């Protein structure tokens, strides 16, 4: 029997759309195609126009400004969403930032401020996003996903402090999964191979990473945005109901190879 994912009647919040190349955007398109209703939280005023233009192609979604490092703002975004919808079913956290100076060069050169900035934006933000979002998930629970990268466990020259941030993020996924599991809320991460996006453009050696995937992954090609969108759809649907606290690669198998 063919299986299809139907999210009709499901509602969720997406953090991290900046433009049409954003991973969060491709995930949003998949979710909308499956029938889900979406609210978008964008980072700052600068993104308001472009994000409004982009997401309005999905109808008339709720669009709210939210710097995710501002916990009060995260809380009030969920309050606004709760007053509109009452409850939510899923959350997409697709947020990361590091100072350009802290990507590339010697890892040991990272400043405390650079360390804080990267860890705060790229790892800590999942905590308030889950803390204030999970309680809005009803009795049937819900699903939260975040985006990570293999540099959490291996050294990718150039990725530097973001590797540290992704290691912290993956640990949070496990701790949040354990905490919210009894309420039926699942928390998982997708570990995506390199995709050309705004954030990826700041990573020195990004093109070499794509080439390495082409040359050395079992599938012998880089992954696509759509493949990440499909995995997100699976993790945010009941098809993945037995999975939580996991870091699931969408990397053409690159992560299993030593050479
Ligand atoms: N592109 C890749 O190759 C790749 C691979 C693996 C994982 N990822 C991860 O995917 C996620 C999305 O990145 P992307 O590649 O789509 O790039 P992107 O630049 O499109 O998305 C990053 C998003 O983070 C948002 N953001 C940054 N700081 C924020 C803050 N303080 N508050 C709210 N939002 C903030 C930006 O506005 C942007 O929308 C990131 O976690 C990234 O590390 C990307």
Image (tube, grey):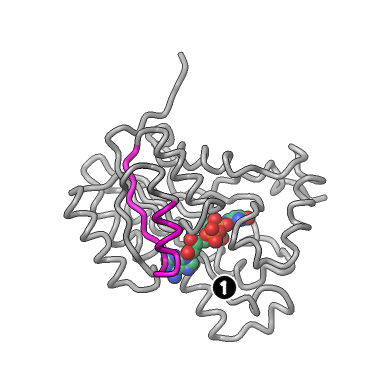
Nearest the eye: 204 or 187: 204
- 109 or 62: nearer the eye? 62
Q: Residue at x 61, y 73 (%)?
A: 161
Q: Could one spot residue 171 in this view of the protein?
A: no
Q: Is residue 223 visible?
A: yes
Residue at x 39% of width, y 68% of height: 68
Asked if 88 appears above or below 131 in the picture, the reply is above
Q: Was residue 38 drawn as part of the magenta stretch in this picture? A: yes
Vertical position of residue 179 compared to residue 164: above or below: above
Dot 1: element: loop
Q: Nearer the viewer, residue 76 or 192?
A: 76
Q: Position of residue 64 (x, y in %)?
A: 32, 60
Q: Can you say whether 159 is above or below 173 in the image?
A: below
- Residue 81, horizontal then vertical, whole percent: 24, 55
Q: Position of residue 113 (x, y in %)?
A: 53, 85
Q: Residue at x 71, y 45 (%)?
A: 222
Residue 193 image point, x, y percent: 65, 50
Relative horizontal placement of residue 227, taking residue 143 as reference (left or right): right
Q: Which residues are magenta?
A: 36-53
Residue 83 part of the magenta segment: no
Crowdedness near tag 1: few (<14), some (14–19) or many (≥20) residues, C-alpha within 10 Å:
many
Q: Which residue is mark 1?
A: 98
């Amino acid at each position: 029997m063919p299986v299809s994912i139907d999210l009709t009647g499901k509602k969720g919040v997406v953090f991290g759309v900046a433009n049409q190349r954003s991973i969060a955007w491709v995930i949003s398109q998949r979710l909308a195609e499956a029938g889900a209703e979406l609210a978008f939280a964008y980072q700052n005023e600068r993104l308001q126009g472009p994000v409004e233009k982009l997401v309005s192609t999905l109808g008339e979604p709720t669009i709210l400004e939210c710097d995710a490092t501002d916990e009060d703002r995260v809380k009030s975004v969920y309050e606004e969403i709760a007053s509109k919808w009452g409850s939510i079913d899923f959350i997409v956290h697709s947020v990361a930032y590091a100072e350009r100076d802290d990507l590339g060069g010697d890892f040991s050169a990272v400043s405390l401020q650079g360390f804080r900035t990267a860890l705060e934006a790229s790892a800590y933000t999942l905590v308030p996003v889950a803390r204030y979002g999970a309680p809005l998930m009803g009795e049937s629970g819900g699903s939260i996903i975040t985006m990570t990268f293999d540099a959490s466990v291996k050294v990718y020259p150039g990725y530097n402090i973001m590797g540290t941030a992704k290691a912290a993020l993956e640990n949070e996924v496990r701790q949040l999964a354990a905490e919210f599991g009894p309420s039926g809320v699942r928390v998982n991460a997708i570990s995506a191979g390199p995709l050309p996006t705004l954030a990826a453009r700041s990573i020195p050696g990004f093109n070499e990473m794509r080439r390495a995937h082409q040359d050395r992954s079992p599938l012998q090609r880089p992954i696509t945005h759509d493949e990440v969108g499909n995995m997100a759809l699976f993790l945010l649907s009941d098809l993945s109901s037995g999975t939580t606290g996991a870091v699931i690669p969408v990397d053409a198998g690159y992560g299993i190879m030593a050479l």
